[in-house]
Amino acid sequence: MKRFVENRFGLMLLVLVALGALYGVAFLTRPAPTPPPAKAPQKVVVESVMAVCPAPRGAEVSVLSEPGAGQVTVGGKAVAEPSWRSAIKGDEPVVVTGTGARASGLEASIGTRVTKGRSRGLAGVRCTEPAGSTWLVGPGPSAADVELHLANADASPALADVNVYSAEGPVIGDAGRGITIKPGAHLVLDLKTIAPSATVAAVEVTTISGRLAVAARTELDAGGVDWLPAALPPATRVVVPGIPSGEGRRELLVAAPGAEDARVQVRAVSTDGSYAMKGRETVDVPAGSVAVADLTKGLDGHAAALVLTSDVPVVAGMAVSTSADVAFTAGTPALDLGSAAAGDRRGSSLVLSAVGGPGRVRVRTTRETTTVDVPAARTKVVKVSGGVVVTPVSGEVYGGRVTRERVKGGELITVGTLSPGRTWTMLPTFTADPAVILP
């Protein structure tokens, strides 16, 4: 060893080994680099849209789009007009597509008007994009005929489960399990085959594979017909907008689909201001069930929205009854990305609610564009006609479109929630990470 050290080359080798060990320990014990801050999702223009309209015989489909490059098709046929409507022939769902600049802001809906018979009423629903999960809240099969429309517009089969929650709790059984919808096919499912005794129901349609466009048509035994709007998925804060003024009952339906009971705080944001309704300040919902609260006296015939705050996630909707018809609204996101409503019925109005501070939106119809200021914690009603585009300016604003028609024997009514428009979408950002490909 002494001879090795005395050799200058050996000494140099020992020094290099020592330095290598020192730097190796420093490398292994150095603090991990601080990762760059996560980037927020980017707001990008929508360039492709597909929406599916359920198609009962006799319905009318309405389409609203922006002019520009690209194409809009309805049932495979090109549509050049920015505002277009036509009666539906047959009972097949209608697929509406848009590409390029014409996809941005594309909106479609269907509607029916029946003035006589058991199916008397105004009924309408937004044509929805295929999705992996959809929530609906409304009456159950023991109080109404409820038809669940499941449409698969994709080129691959879809496998789905239908889960139903009632006032008594979750409905147990295999009737709603493993439902297969072939590519391009649709299925109309009578909810009575899954939950025959439910008076109220929250329905969750989830796909195990593929995507489905889901809608539900409801015809009350006591009279009145309409479609159930898609509800916001379970959340601890839910806003139910678009509650119209006028006669009739107003019933709030709240479902707690989880394993814990929910205590829900309820506040009304009406044309008179924001307040907790006496005797209805809270609604208790047992785990896995649906609770009903009659808010007719609390709302006192005023146009309003409801703000629900819960300790556990809930799903919510509302049934609006007149002497001759019924309509439904449900939990909906704010108008942060704008919204639009197709259709050209007379007797329509927007019910806009500013939750918290004051709000401002721009409302564009086929005739004019106006700026609407909504006072803080209040609701404002704006009359409109034709297709409507709502663009947010400031504040947290929610809304719905109400259409009414007075006929002999009462008032017909339908409500459409102002869902997030298809003008913009939030695109998540991605970070390169080699760990995703390492074993």
Image (tube, helix red, strand yellow):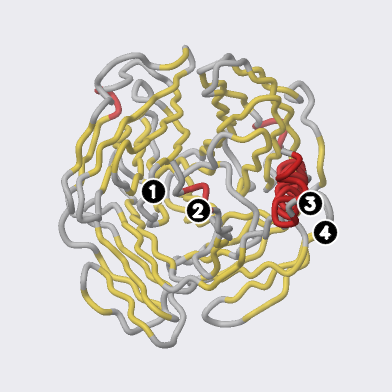
Among numbered discs 3 and 2, the one appearing first in the sequence: 3
191 left or right, relative to 279 = left
Q: Amino acid at mark 3?
A: Arg
The disc placed on residue 358 is 4
Residue receiving disc 2: 416
C-alpha span from label 1 to label 3:
33 Å
The quarter of the image holding the N terminus is top right
Q: Are marks 3 and 2 in contact (CB under 8 Å)?
A: no
Decide: few, some or many residues near mark 3? Use Cα within 10 Å; few <14, some 14-19, many ≥20: many
The nearer-to-camera label among 4 and 2 is 4
74 left or right, relative to 255 = left
Q: Are marks 4 and 2 in contact (CB under 8 Å)?
A: no
Q: Nearer the viewer, residue 91 or 335?
A: 335
Residue 132 pos. (x, y %): 38, 44
**Helix, strand or loop for disc 1:** loop
**Helix, strand or loop for disc 3:** strand
Decide: few, some or many residues near mark 2? Use Cα within 10 Å; few <14, some 14-19, many ≥20: many
The nearer-to-camera label among 4 and 3 is 4
C-alpha span from label 4 to label 3:
8 Å
C-alpha span from label 3 to label 2:
20 Å
Residue receiving disc 1: 131
Q: Nearer the viewer, residue 376 or 185?
A: 185
Residue 16 pos. (x, y %): 72, 53
C-alpha span from label 4 to label 2:
23 Å
Q: Amino acid at mark 2?
A: Gly
C-alpha span from label 1 to label 4:
33 Å
Image position of 113 with respect to 216: above or below: below
